[in-house]
Image: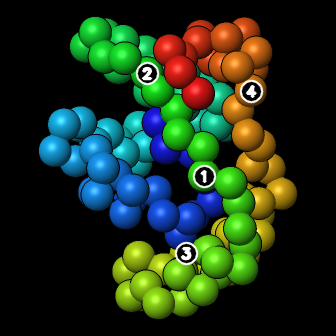
Amino acid sequence: MLIGLQASGKTTFYRQRLARTHTHVSKDAFPNARHPQRRQLRLIAAARAQDARVVRYWFPPDLAASMARNATRNARTRVPDVGLYATIKILRRPTREYVRRQLGGAEKV
């Protein structure tokens, strides 16, 4: 799972380092949950159902860099600035304890 602010480089990281050996499952494939934790639980459950190892990659937020990258995106992929501001307010680094207790665990954070 790649966790970070929009336009933080998650897709680029996936393409450069994981695409050859890992399957990309977009959160867009799962209906938005009222609480992101529920969506994450569904993603973890889906991965485990396929005997996949769950690893989380954290992309520390850098609002200025994300805003700059986002500004270079085309209209179809650009995130409204308000979306970046809203996300940075709620984005938290997942701690091992949080992952274990709230999200059913992950093999590595």
In the image, taking residue 73 as reference, residue 81 lies left or right, namely: right
The tag earlier along the polypeptide, 2 or 4, is 2
Residues at circles 3 and 4 in contact by the CB criterion of under 8 Å: no
Where is 46 relative to 82, above or below?
Answer: above
- Nearer to us: label 3 or label 4: 4
- The answer to which of 3 and 79 lies nearer the viewer is 3
Distance between mark 3 and mark 4 Cα atoms: 27 Å
Tell me the tag on residue 69: none
How many C-alpha atoms fall within 10 Å of the one at disc 3: few (<14), some, or many (≥20)? Answer: some
Q: Which residue is mark 3?
A: 79
Distance between mark 4 and mark 1 Cα atoms: 13 Å
- The answer to which of 1 and 35 lies nearer the viewer is 1
Q: Which residue is mark 2?
A: 54
Q: Is residue 70 visible?
A: yes
Tell me the tag on residue 59: 1
Q: Is residue 42 visible?
A: no
- Could you tell me the amino acid type at mark 4? Thr
In the image, taking residue 17 as reference, residue 67 lies left or right, namely: right
Residue at the outermost right position: 89
- Could you tell me the amino acid type at mark 1? Phe
- Could you tell me the amino acid type at mark 3? Val
Residues at circles 2 and 1 in contact by the CB criterion of under 8 Å: no
The tag earlier along the polypeptide, 2 or 1, is 2
Q: Which residue is mark 4?
A: 95
Residues at circles 2 and 3 in contact by the CB criterion of under 8 Å: no
Where is 57 relative to 46, above or below?
Answer: below
Q: On the image, which quarter does residue 75 sit in?
A: bottom left
The tag earlier along the polypeptide, 4 or 1, is 1
**Residue in the image at 54% along x and 81% along y:** 70
In the image, taking residue 38 as reference, residue 49 lies left or right, namely: left
